[in-house]
Amino acid sequence: MADHRVGRLGDKTPLQYARPATINRLAREGRCGRLMTVPEGFPPGSEVANTAILGYDLNKVYEGRGPLEAASIGYDMADDDMAIRCNIITLEQGNIITHNGGNLETADAHVLIDYLNDNLAKPINEEQCCERVKFIAGIQYRHLLIIKGGSKHIVCAPPHDHPNEPWEPLLVKAESGEWKEESGRLSAKETAELLNTLIIKSQELLSTHPYNIAKAANGERQANSIWPWSGGYRPSMQTLMERYPQVKSGAVISAVDLIQGIGRYAGLRIVKVAGATGLADTNYEGKAQAAIDALKTDDFVFVHVEATDEAGHDGDLELKLLAIDYLDKRLIKPIIEAIETMDETVCVAVLPDHPTPVELRIHVSEPVPFVIWYHGIVPDSVEHYDEESCVNGSYGLLRLNEFMDELMSI
């Protein structure tokens, strides 16, 4: 949701232009600040930022997106698995056009994943009776690729960071440097070569699939290549209950596998909401009601909405403004109204995980604004919730686990 000033908006950020009424009310009645969600040396991805927001030390627990999404999907990783996020993307004239396969629908994606498994998943050998390569279907364009015995020491380019760039220079490479790889694993070079072979073969296969033939005939964007990135091994994480004794139970509400996976490792129960899409058309009211219901039984509820991020990646300013408005009116407002009828005081924090500036179309590693609100909190002088007003908030600039530590102290 956080962004930069946009000339088309009179040199205002989308938050300054949209003036979300309920979030601004929380800013007036609560206390604000900014949070640096991405540790030095880490990419500004959602897997990094959301894990840091929850108070985890990325240097100790980070294994990439793949293992987190495996946890969400319900795939129990073996010790020798390397799990890597696998987008289905759109290529045109040698360039990455979209990271989302032209807003690929989940049902269509599952057909394509089955097709890839039938044609690309190969056994290591007959004696071992296990697969070196396995595709696991997720949601929309977000899927999982398991490389049995793969190495995580590879360099992959997140496709959402490279819109309209040539894809071939972005192919997977072996990581430079020295490390001791586990016995029985492929080398980093072998893993990179395998992944690049899968990318190229997927393009040959997907271009001839009936789904993409129909898309091409209609002049629509095709879902015509896989793109693996952010792989790792099975992580070891304490639950939130182990880290913060204030939390006896918790829930996570999100349409995104990655966020559900973080929640599962954090010990949160996953609440799935019908009609939650990860896009601007998501079921805001359903998510709000799920959060209200969870607050009746759980100490901690993490509600995640992807819509503004996707609009930022698409460079769609109008959609980002609409998504901010929907988030404010259709999700945050009903939650606050319900909280005000509850006997027990509830503390609410609102923040993005990272900025996705609509004119850049990529994640950036910059502080995000946040507000903390509850009945009885002494407000600061901030009147509006936005990237610049929150600079003057009484919390100042927090870093990483300092936000969760502050929230838990309340």
Image (cartoon, rainbow, N blue to C red):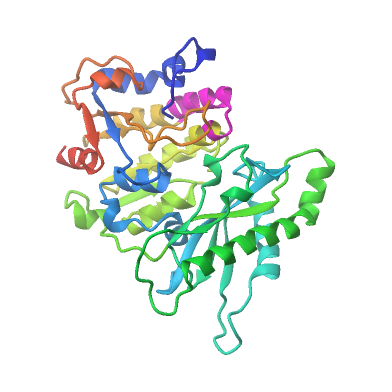
Q: Which residue is drawn at 80% across and 56% down?
A: 208
Seen as rendered, the residue at the extreme right is 217
Q: Is residue 40 left or right of residue 402?
A: right
Image position of 343 (left or right of 152): left
Please report the residue visible at 55 percent of the width from the left and 32 percent of the height from the top: 311
Q: Is residue 192 visible?
A: yes
Left or right: where 318 falls relative to 37: right
Which residue: 40% across, 45% down?
43
Image quarter of the N terminus: top left
Q: Relative to residue 289, is residue 146 depicted above or below?
A: below
Dominant SS of magenta comes to helix
Q: Picture coordinates of residue 174 (x, y %)? A: 48, 61
In this view, the residue in front, 227 or 65, is 227
Where does residue 340 sit, x and y in percent of width and height?
29, 28
Magenta part of the chain: 312-330
Q: Which of 265 and 133 is in front in this view?
A: 133
Residue 320 belongs to magenta span: yes
The verdict on residue 225 being magenta is no
x, y percentage for residue 229? Answer: 51, 54
Instruction: Name the residue nearer the viewer: 385 or 254.
Output: 385
Q: Is residue 283 above or below residue 379?
A: below
- Is residue 269 visible in the rendered image? The answer is no
On the image, the x and y values in percent for residue 343 come to 23, 35
Report the front residue among 136 and 286: 136
Quadrant for the C terminus, please.
top left
- For the point 21% across and 15% down, which residue is it? 381
Hey, which residue is sitting farthest top in the picture? 10
Decide if residue 30 is on the left or right side of residue 98. Answer: left
